[in-house]
Every structure is written in structure tokens, then in C-alpha cells.
């Protein structure tokens, strides 16, 4: 299964609309997972013209979306033998900041990531998709793949075209491609 990953669209605010490049990059995906800061349901409607959409919302920012059946606070999906947890803000006990590349290893080197993710999602997961920082983060810890696809509209918190990702899943296989929409 081919899955488009997007987060932190911040529309309106970060941009007036989803960059056109997203439609091209996501052409042919089977599912789109949006990991929060959606702001309004019409963003999900636009993405749904490409493929079915599921989203993990941000309670403080996505209040207009809470009646939308595509949005939950946390998602647990079983796809091609992989258990995927999706959340907007990956809050790690003992670490009060955003999860940036290298921050887990630097600040929580002795923590069991599988146990921590099971605590967060209430079940074991092997892939975690999150957002919030608007920075691409792709790390593997104890066989748990952690993915923040970045923001397509706020590259590293700046109003610039940014990133999305494609996750290809088969039983026993997972391949991830981060895509820079600016070039």
C-alpha cells in the first residue's frame, strides 16, 4: 500500500492553499494520513480528491474538524501487517520539547521507545507518524520507525514550500521517501 503523509498544513495562516505539488506527488497513493494542524475540514476535502484521508487532529488548532469522521485525536491503523500510530504532537514523558531530528537520542538515550510508544498509543506500534514541529524527522529506534513528514507550507516554521512523504508498505517491508516540494 502506498500512503501519502502530510502534516501541519496550517491553512489559513501558513498558506492560502495546499501547494499544487502535493497533488502531483500524492497521485496514485491509496491513502493519505494527515498528522494535524489541519485547521478546517475543507483541507481534508481537497486531499480526498486524491485518495481517502484519515487524520489525527490537534485539539487546540483543529477544533473545526472534531465533528469530521476522518479526524481523531490518535489513530491506530493495521496496514499490510504493520501497526501504525498517528498523532499530532508526540509528547514524550521526560522530554517537554518538540521532537526534532536527534532529540530522542540526545535527551532520552536510555528510554525504551517500544514501551513508550505502547504507553502513548495503548498498544504496540512499529511505525509512528506525527507532526507539530514542521521539521522532517525520520528516525528508527528499536525497530520503531518515527516519521514527521514536515509541513508543505511552513518549512521549518518559515512560510516556504516544504515537505511531504510517501510510505510504501508490504508485509515485512516499509520504505519511506521524504519529498521536498520546492524542487
Image: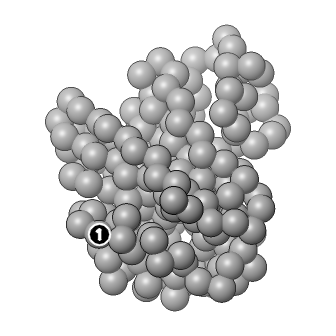
Q: Is residue 6 left or right of residue 52?
A: right
* Residue under the image location 51 percent in, 42 percent down: 147
Q: Position of residue 117 (x, y in %)?
A: 53, 33
> Where, by quadrant of the figure, is residue 134 drawn?
bottom right
Q: With 65 as the anchor, is 170 left or right in this view?
A: left
Name, please, the residue furthest toward the left: 171
Q: Is residue 113 left or right of residue 50?
A: right
Q: Nearer the viewer, residue 27 or 62?
A: 27
Q: Position of residue 69 (x, y in %)?
A: 43, 77
Indicate whether 1 appears above or below 124: below
Residue drawn 42% across the image and 38% down it: 127
Q: Is residue 70 visible?
A: no
Q: Nearer the viewer, residue 6 or 114?
A: 6
- Kindly identify the residue that appears in the image at 46 percent across and 47 percent down: 178
Residue under label 1 = 27
SS state under label 1:
loop
Amino acid at each position: 500500500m502506498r500512503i501519502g503523509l502530510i502534516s501541519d498544513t496550517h491553512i489559513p495562516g501558513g498558506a492560502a492553499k495546499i501547494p499544487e505539488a502535493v497533488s502531483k506527488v500524492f497521485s496514485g497513493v491509496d491513502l493519505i494520513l494527515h498528522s494535524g494542524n489541519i485547521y478546517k475540514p475543507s483541507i481534508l476535502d481537497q486531499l480526498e480528491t486524491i485518495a481517502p484521508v484519515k487524520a489525527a487532529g490537534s485539539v487546540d488548532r483543529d477544533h473545526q474538524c472534531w465533528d469530521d469522521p476522518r479526524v481523531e485525536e490518535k489513530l491506530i491503523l493495521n496496514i499490510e501487517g504493520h501497526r501504525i500510530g498517528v498523532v499530532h504532537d508526540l509528547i514524550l514523558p521526560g522530554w517537554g520539547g518538540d521532537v526534532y531530528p536527534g532529540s530522542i537520542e540526545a535527551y532520552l538515550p536510555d528510554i525504551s521507545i517500544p514501551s513508550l510508544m505502547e504507553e502513548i498509543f495503548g498498544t504496540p506500534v512499529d511505525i509512528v507518524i506525527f507532526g507539530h514541529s514542521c521539521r522532517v524527522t525520520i528516525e528508527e529506534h528499536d525497530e520503531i520507525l518515527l516519521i514527521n513528514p514536515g509541513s508543505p507550507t511552513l518549512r521549518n516554521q518559515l512560510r516556504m514550500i516544504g515537505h511531504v512523504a510517501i510510505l510504501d508498505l508490504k508485509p515485512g517491508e516499509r520504505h519511506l521517501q521524504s519529498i521536498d516540494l520546492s524542487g
